[in-house]
Image (cartoon, rainbow, N blue to C red):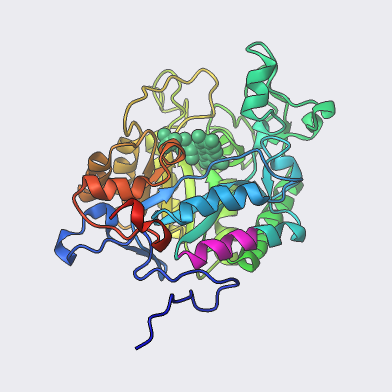
């Protein structure tokens, strides 16, 4: 029998075939730790529970992905994660956080994304994209530009800095902070237009070949700002005290996205808390900030619409937020949502670095998935290190095997 370096079938270039796929646990079935057990959502199988959290790169060329993204995302695809979620990608130009953010508002943005998707698929790794609108936190500087500008410099990117401060929208006209753009309150027409933009973006995601979509409803960006009573003081059916009103527009977007993307997994990233002072609800029953009780109700509504996974983050909507940072500081939010909605898949994120703790979150049913951002920047091979720590064997890429055996 001839010995041949087998190719990935039907790939656009020659790539050696990994058998089994990179990141698959090769220990006996009963030894496979929770972290490395496959997860199936809406018929899509994720080979393990370690996901790359979305990470803005502020490196797009008028919204188009570049070779930076191919290398950055491709590097994760070759190193054993179960899935990668590409960064916040705006469905309209004015929905970018910063001028160099990713976009999916026009067809020319499909091809560079398709190249990245095809590469990830050739490495046996699932890839999704986070669809976003930055709302009142749009038209700001990339972090390193802000740092260079100095501590007192405004966050707003002016027109001469390639920003669009006069074309920034929110639920109300409240800015996130004094040095952020002043948003215009969205009209119903604006909302209709944006819903259409999300649906058009989904058509482009389909053409690019993504495996899943995540709607960004966290971190103080547009949809989160609709949910929170701190940022949404509208007096129409889309705002104010009633939770039903504040959820209305985010749920409309989720519903439209679900209908436009019926066959593959749909995720929603939420902020489970604004981390503002005081109780979520006061003694008179008034909602004061966004927190876990409303998050649980919102997640229940998302599940009814057919959302497959809630990616549970927190913060970003209240400039004075105080977050007690420690390993897994957001796990209790995921756990609370999981308890309220046991059949809804939940991902937890935030300062997860230790493989034993990560595995325990899944084993104990607090979450179904762990998402990592900064630890994977520092240690892109984290999944393989995690396997070592957990005492099991996981398949590295053929080309990298000599680093592990
Ligand atoms: C460089 C960088 C860019 C980020 N960009 C996004 C983003 O596009 N969308 C998002 O929802 N969160 C974004 N985040 C937040 C991460 O997805 C993650 O929730 C957060 O960093 C906490 O996880 P970690 O402690 O593992 O880094 C970003 C974080 C980093 C470090």
Q: Is residue 32 left or right of residue 341?
A: left
Q: Nearer the viewer, residue 327 or 93?
A: 327
- Residue 90 at x, y = what percent? 67, 47
Residue at horizontal 55 percent and vertical 26 percent from the top: 230
Q: In the depicted view, which residue is nearer to us: 63 or 2?
A: 2
Q: Quadrant of residue 176 in the image?
A: top right
Whether residue 388 is visible here, answered yes or no, is: yes
Asked if 2 appears above or below 182 in the picture, the reply is: below
Camera sees residue 214? no
Q: Main secondary structure of the magenta part?
A: helix
Q: Give residue 235's position: percent from left, percent from top.
A: 64, 34
Q: Which residues are magenta?
A: 113-123
Image side of residue 135 versus residue 28, left or right? right
Name which residue lies at 47% across and 56% down.
77
In reply to whether residue 399 is colored magenta, the answer given is no
Q: Residue drawn 28% across and 46% down?
A: 386
């Amino acid at each position: 029998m001839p010995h041949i370096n087998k190719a990935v079938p039907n790939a656009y270039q020659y790539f050696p075939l990994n058998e089994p796929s990179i990141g698959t646990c090769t220990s006996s079935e009963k030894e496979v730790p929770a972290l490395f057990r496959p997860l199936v959502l809406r018929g899509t199988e994720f080979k393990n529970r370690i996901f790359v959290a979305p990470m803005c790169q502020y490196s797009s060329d008028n919204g188009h992905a570049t070779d930076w993204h191919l290398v950055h995302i491709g590097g994760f695809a070759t190193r054993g994660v179960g899935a990668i979620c590409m960064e916040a990608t705006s469905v309209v130009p004015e929905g970018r956080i910063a001028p160099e953010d990713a976009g999916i508002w026009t067809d020319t943005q499909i091809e560079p994304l398709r190249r990245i998707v095809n590469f990830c698929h050739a490495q046996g790794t699932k890839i999704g994209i986070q669809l976003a609108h930055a709302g009142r936190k749009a038209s700001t500087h990339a972090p390193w530009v802000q740092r260079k500008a100095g501590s007192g410099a405004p966050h707003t990117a002016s027109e001469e800095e390639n920003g669009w401060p006069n074309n920034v929208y929110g639920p109300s006209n409240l800015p996130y902070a004094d040095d952020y753009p002043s948003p215009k309150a969205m009209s119903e027409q604006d909302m209709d237009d944006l819903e259409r933009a999300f649906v058009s973006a989904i058509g482009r995601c389909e053409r690019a070949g993504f495996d899943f979509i995540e709607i960004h409803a966290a971190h103080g960006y547009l949809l989160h700002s609709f949910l929170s009573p701190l940022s949404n003081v509208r007096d129409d059916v889309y705002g104010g005290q009633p939770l039903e009103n504040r959820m209305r527009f985010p749920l409309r977007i989720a519903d439209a996205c679900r209908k436009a993307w019926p066959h593959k997994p749909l995720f929603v990233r939420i902020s489970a808390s604004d981390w503002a002072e005081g109780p979520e609800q006061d003694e008179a029953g008034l909602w004061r900030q966004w927190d876990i009780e409303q998050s649980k109700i919102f997640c229940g509504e998302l599940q009814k619409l057919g959302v497959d996974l809630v990616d549970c983050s927190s913060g970003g909507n209240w400039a004075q937020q105080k977050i007690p940072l420690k390993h897994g500081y957001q796990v209790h939010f995921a756990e609370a949502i999981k308890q309220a909605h046991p059949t809804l898949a939940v991902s937890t994120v935030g300062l997860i670095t230790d493989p034993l703790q990560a595995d325990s979150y899944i084993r104990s049913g607090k979450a179904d998935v762990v998402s990592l951002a900064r630890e994977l920047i520092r240690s892109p091979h984290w999944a393989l290190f995690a396997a070592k720590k957990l005492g099991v064997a996981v398949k590295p890429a053929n080309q990298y095997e000599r680093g592990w055996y």
